[in-house]
Image (tube, helix red, strand yellow):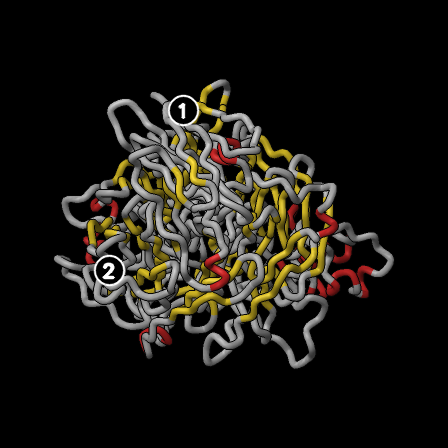
Amino acid sequence: MSVIFARCAGESESVRKAGREVDLLHIFGPYSSVRAAKVGRVFVRCGRRAGGYVTDPIVGAEPHVEAGSGRGGVEGADSPPQERKMSRVMGRLVPRLLTVVIVMCNTGNLALAQQGAQGGEWRHYGGDLGGTKYAPLEQIDRTNVAGLEVAWRWRTDNFGPRLDFNYQATPLMVGGVLYTTAGWRRNVVAIDGATGETLWLYRYDEADRGEMAPVRASSGRGVAYWTDGADDERIVHVTKGYHLVALNAKTGLPVTAFGEEGVVDLYDGLYEGLDRPSVEDGQIGLNSPALVVGDVIVVGAALRATAPSRAFAAGFVRGFDVRTGEQLWIFHTIPQPGEFGNDTWEEESWRYSGNTGVWAPMSADQELGYVYLPVETPTNDLYGGHRPGDNLFAESLVCLDAKTGERIWHFQFVHHGIWDYDIPTAPALVDLTVEGRSIKAVAQVTKQAFTYVFDRVTGEPVWPIEERPVPASTVPGEQASSTQPFPTRPAPFDRQGVSGDDLLDFTPELNAEARRIASEYELGPIFTPPILAGANGRRGLLMLPQMTGGANWQGGAVDADAGILYVASVTNPTVAGLTNDPGRSTMDYVGGGTRRRRGSAAPQGCGEIGPLGLPLIKPPWGRITAIDLNTGDHLWMIANGDTPDCVKNHPALSGLDIPRTGKPERSGILVTKTLVFAGEGAGLFATPTWAGGPMFHAYDKQTGETIWEFELPKRQSGVPMTYMIDGKQYIAMAISARGEPAELIALTLP
């Protein structure tokens, strides 16, 4: 294999080559822009916004320089792409790093290793295709982070008929421009990354179909980006009502050659050739962005959590041609006859069972051409009596060939799921060294607080995963799996199951009351099945991690250079009980019947089910855990967030020294070359009212020590990202507060 590489003028960083990997930041420097690269006769043009462009020598090529003209390259090479003409602002923006060429013997494939976000940009929801949420930027470090100040704020209050105050999007940054979704109607917007100025806006009017969509974040979590490496740049968008849209990144106008005038109806082709009813409005949508792998757009689905009957819509995964919108393939997450796994849906339950979609973001390895799907629970979340069997590919990580949709390998984390333990977040792709072996790995964090680590090429576990016996179900008609898979390394990053040892113990009196309250519930280890509400005098199963996790859509972040995972999680139980409720579903049982009746008096303390309104389980209630994926060892764990006021000021705790407890909310995490950044979470969905907070923290990567904290105008509600423009590093994120317009905010040094 031969590698073509270059270094821009004035940059002295060494080039690092390892197999097929090339560290682009070291090649081109943090502030340079590769304007184009061609296989064969290669030119690379480097530049800054001031002055002309300079083309540096490339191995095996003679440079041709036309300083200041905007032209340059190897003699005879194609001309570089046209300059952006979006606006006065866009005219002065120099697009960032577009491509690096790696020329391999007997192949023209281009490869990009899982190195985090490169070239000062943030081209994918997770920074890179591998979902690391890592950028090797280091301008902001522990010596100057305290100097961060607000660069700009961008508000969403004019982007829909009512406020969408739970803003979960993470913007992309390409060529100095942020691309994201915003507002109740899920508009797509382009924003100047240096000033916060709106450059363009797009909205697809879906009328009632959009209003009825089963999405929990109307604004969505972002968009995807694609370029042909020349002058065709596209923003790929999934609407609230489940349409796929391709927009010109320069203008925001639909790409008319894509689908029908830029739009593909994702209802079409979903059940083609299958004996399933057509999709109805309100059954299917998607919060997460699509994923573009090469020239294929991979699209998942999100569906209603509680189906009205055992027969419901299924969320199959599909691939579309990024240029034309043509559907290329479909992967049946509920296998059909003749497909692998069909026999795990006994009594022909594959015919009618639904959900089993991919609502979380996905990850991909472009070099391998593989896409990794985190699949959710089947219909219904807590009861599987109508779908006997293990139910592949529910609650599995599935690796597909992105071009064909062919299954390469899979691993099922929960057999016959009855806990709502969806796989909630994109797996992280990272290259590890384990006991001297180099492994291209994929790490999946889960709601149940496990981290499963595999060879992402073969699907082989990096450390043994054991099938262990788990309790049987007592619910009539339910046939729970007798075993579940337990990874032997790393250890769980949060508490699993509930026993007397987990109960609040600030004082002996509080602990005694906590034990009395706990006696009203079924307790047991993880994978103890839900019970019928009221059975044997118990309200339901006290479930930990709860149905939303452990980890959830925020997931974790991985230092791609060091192989260290940082994951946020919640320690706050939920009550899982089942009831027959024909008004909600014709299934034998659905979740419910576990609510406590409250008196007319105001709730005590934090309003929790524990003693005197305190949490029932002892802290920490929110945490961040650092795990070395090279060894499987935990490096540190910290409580994420201060002790809430409803605990600090509780009269039963007067005079006690309560340690920092954290708050029961997950934070999106960003990792840079120097620091770990995390807020306290928004506390706006499926959390106690006292969860979340406005503080944004910088933590030491090796110890978890708090280096700096900053009070945001609202609470961090999206995963943070970072980028460089004109030699300045920015950190941007969505922030939200109940009843107020959500915003994007960007921080930078003076």
Residue under the image location 42 percent in, 73 percent down: 185
Q: Do labels 2 and 1 touch, CB within 8 Å?
A: no
Q: Position of residue 495 (x, y in %)?
A: 58, 45
Q: Which residue corresponds to the image point at 52% horizontal and 65% vertical from the top-left? A: 167
- Image point 81% across, 59% down: which residue? 653
Q: Residues within 10 Å of mark 1 (few under 14, many from 20)?
A: few
User: Height in image: 10 above or below 192?
Assistant: above
Q: Which residue is located at x 14 percent, y 44 percent? A: 338
SS for callout 2: loop
How many labels sit on residues? 2
Instruction: Identify which residue, 500 or 430, lies in the foreground.
Output: 430
> Residue 723, can we see it?
no
Residue beneath disc 1: 59
For disc 2, the marked residue is: 258
Three-letter amino acid code at disc 1? Val
Q: Is there any visible trace of residue 400 in the rendered image?
A: yes
SS at circle 1: loop
Residue 407: quadrant of the picture:
top left
Residue 135 position within the rendered picture, expressed as x and y whole percent measured from the top left: 54, 42
Q: Of the residues under marks 2 and 1, which one precedes in the sequence?
A: 1
- Amino acid type, residue under disc 2 in the picture: Phe
Numbered mark located on residue 93 in the image? none
In the displayed structure image, the side of residue 378 where residue 527 appears, left or right: right
Q: Nearer the viewer, residue 529 or 428?
A: 428
Q: Nearer the viewer, residue 47 or 385?
A: 47
Q: Look at discs 2 and 1 and give the one toward the viewer.
A: 1
From the viewer's side, name the closer residue of 535 and 643.
643
Name of the residue lying farthest toward the right: 655
* Residue 345 on image: x %, y %: 24, 49
Q: Is residue 598 left or right of residue 169?
A: right
On the image, the x and y values in percent for residue 76 come to 29, 35
Distance (Cα) linking label 2 and label 1: 38 Å
